[in-house]
Image (spheres, grey):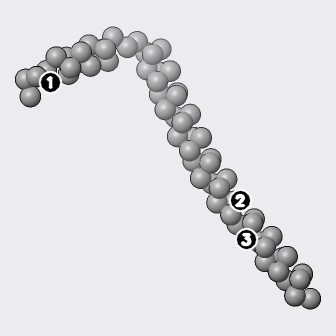
Amino acid sequence: MISNAPYAASAVTVIAGFTVKDWGVIIGVILTMITVAVNWVYKHRQDQRESALFNRKINNHLKH
């Protein structure tokens, strides 16, 4: 635990040195990455639904 103290102190020093502007940028980047991930998941699900619907339509068309 003592050997990790310098690393923890360095991390605290870096974090304490961030300005409000720095925190705004960090939070903005994190929220952007979350938004991209959520959009990708929902778009992927939509693509799957549309592909299944298309395949059902094609199969129904070929049967008739």
Q: Circle 1 sits in a helix, a strand or a loop, which is it?
A: helix
Q: Amino acid at mark 2?
A: Asp
Neighbours of disc 3 within 10 Å: few (<14), some (14-19), many (20+): few
25, above or below 34, in the image:
above
User: Foreground: 24 or 33?
Assistant: 33
Tags 1 and 3 in contact by the CB under 8 Å rule?
Answer: no
What label sits on residue 52 in the rendered view?
A: 3
Q: Quadrant of the C terminus?
A: bottom right
Q: Circle 2 sits in a helix, a strand or a loop, which is it?
A: helix
What label sits on residue 47 in the rendered view?
A: 2
Sooner in the amino-acid sequence: mark 3 or mark 2: 2
Asked whether, in this view, residue 19 is left or right of residue 28, the answer is: left
Residue at 52% over, 40% down: 34
Can you give x and y, in whole percent of width and height, for residue 5 in the image? 13, 21
Tags 3 and 2 in contact by the CB under 8 Å rule?
Answer: no
64, above or below 1, in the image:
below
Q: Amino acid at mark 1?
A: Asn
